[in-house]
Amino acid sequence: MKRIIAGLGTLALLGGLAACGSGAAGSAVGDSTAPVSSPTSPAGASTSGDCFFGANGADVEVGVDSPTQSCAQWVTDLAGDGLVWYPISAMGTEPEVCDLTSGGAEIYVEDDASDIYGYGNSACSSEEQNGWTPESSPGPIASAADQAQQVQASASASAAQAASVSAAQASLASDVTALKTDTSTLNNDTSLGGAVTQMKDAYATEQSDYGTEQGASCGDYSVQDDSYTVADDGYTVQDYGYDEADDVTGLKDGGIAAVQTDVAAVQTDLSTLSGLGATPGTNSSAAIAAGSKALTSADNAISWANGQASTINDEATQLAATAQDYATAHCN
């Protein structure tokens, strides 16, 4: 948005000021290169109010502080830019293009940075050609504009800070909820116990079949057949051992990974809030402690299951070999 602020004193930029004067916006007439104002502008009826104008189709604004001519006359003068002007009640702030002075008066021009070579730059060039010169130090209007821009920047920073804190608080609440849910799921996971139980049952069957072998007869090849049965039982134990290994992998990639991810997410949320200087709105300490405990229990469960599986598998393999040795020793 382009903004042109012209004045003969301090312009109040921080609040909306009502437009004054007796005239309405004039028609767009005159040379499009005519200056916005000049030190030799014809004086009109003196007025004690300030004048503020906008222009149709250009997003330009002009402010005149303590004008020595009527607001209506300013409308007529401004119409020389080829724009249709109308009263507005408030000014805004944009980057400075120029701050000019002449005979104690000041013209301060602002223009949108995206169009720095537009109306604002043209106005500055026109006024300098008419005898206005750059201020050696910021004039009253420029100082007021700087203050307004600082207020605006501070408000924007505060709003961004508040938005960041709000987002971090929401993320923390969500991640704590997820951590509690995944911790409960991990604590109730019994997949490892199932595979170990199957191995134990298969090994018990192998032991029973070995007992049957010892009471069998060599003459009808029952001993040999029973030894093969014992060997098959040993393979069954191994198969369940593979299932136990898959269950361990599934637990690590599933429940354990979920809780680890949740804990890391909560810690990241806490770090973000700390960096923003905000106090966490959700108590996460209990959830983190419970999650850490669940992870420790899961690690212990894996160690137990792996130990059980290894022991049972070794015993089953040894028993199958013993059954084969028995058949060989008694029937050959």
Image: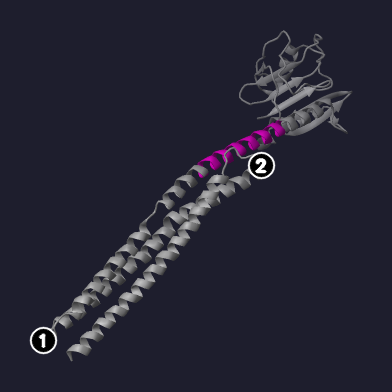
Relative image position of residue 276 (x, y in whole percent): 66, 42
Frontmost residue, 93 versus 5? 93
**How many numbered marks appear?**
2
Main secondary structure along the magenta-highlighted residues:
helix
Corner quadrant of residue 39:
top right
Bounds of the magenta span? 152-175
Specify the label residue 219 is tagged with.
1
At 17% across and 79% down in the image, what residue appears?
215
How dense is the environment of label 2, judged by Cα within 10 Å: few (below 14), some, or many (20 and up)? some
**Residue type highlighted by circle 2:** Leu
Label 1 vs 2, first from the N-terminus: 1
| Res. 211 mark | none
Q: Disc 1 versus disc 2: distance between alpha carbons?
A: 86 Å
Q: Which label number is shown at residue 276?
A: 2
Query: What residue lies at 39% left-to-right and 54% top-to-bottom?
Result: 189
Quarter in which the C terminus is drawn = bottom left
